[in-house]
Amino acid sequence: METDAIVLRDDLRPGDAAAIRAIVRSSGFFHDHEIDVAVELVEDRLSRGPASDYRFLLADAGGRTVGYTCYGEIACTVGSYDLYWIAVHEEWRGRGLGCRLLAETERRIAAAGGRRVYVETSSRPQYEPTRRFYERCGYTVAATLADFYASGDGKVIFCKGVGA
């Protein structure tokens, strides 16, 4: 199960909603309502096609989707993108797949004229590995909003320049 056996694709298929639900659920980090949001973005892209604001990059291994990113240009900006989701199934974590997905997503954003990628995560201790992941991938903290999600649960916003 090495990452070189991975096939990347950006075309969503009807079965991807269930696969993404399973991937996000496998983290153990998200509540059901948050997992539902991840699936809603898939359904938006499937129903609206290219008119959707959400772009996807999926990683398949042996015919099974094992990781993905969801990203899109931030409205009313020039070249700023949000990384809405990045998740790798727990069976595939620790093999470099998250870094590979993120690097390819950044490449695609830059090719589309993107200049910066923003990503947000929680300040809770549970998310320390997530924050370190973004730092290892070249992201820096742009802002921290205390008590954003709930009391004691701030939002940490990371940023990385990817284009000219």
Image: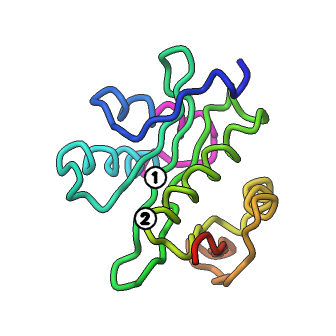
Name the residue tied to disc 2: 112
> Label 2 sits on what residue type?
Ala
User: Viewer-proximal residue, 35 or 107?
Assistant: 107
Q: Residue at x 38, y 53 (%)?
A: 55
Q: Earlier in the sequence, mark 2 or mark 1?
A: 1
Residue pictured at 58% horizontal, 49% vertical? 104
Left or right, 78 with respect to 94, comes to left
The crowding category of the residue bearing disc 1, from other C-alpha atoms within 10 Å (few below 14, some 14 to 19, many at least 20), is: many
Residue 96 in the image: above or below residue 29: above
Q: Secondary structure at mark 2?
A: loop
Quadrant position of residue 87: top right
Q: Residue at x 30, y 62 (%)?
A: 53
6 or 29, which lies in front?
6
* Residue farthest toward the top in the current orientation of the protein: 62
Applied colour scheme: rainbow
Q: What residue is pinned by disc 1?
A: 70
Residue at 33%, 26% (x, y): give it.
15
- For residue 68, above or below residue 48: above
Specify start and end residues of the magenta stretch as a single range.
21-33
Relative image position of residue 81 (x, y in whole percent): 48, 70
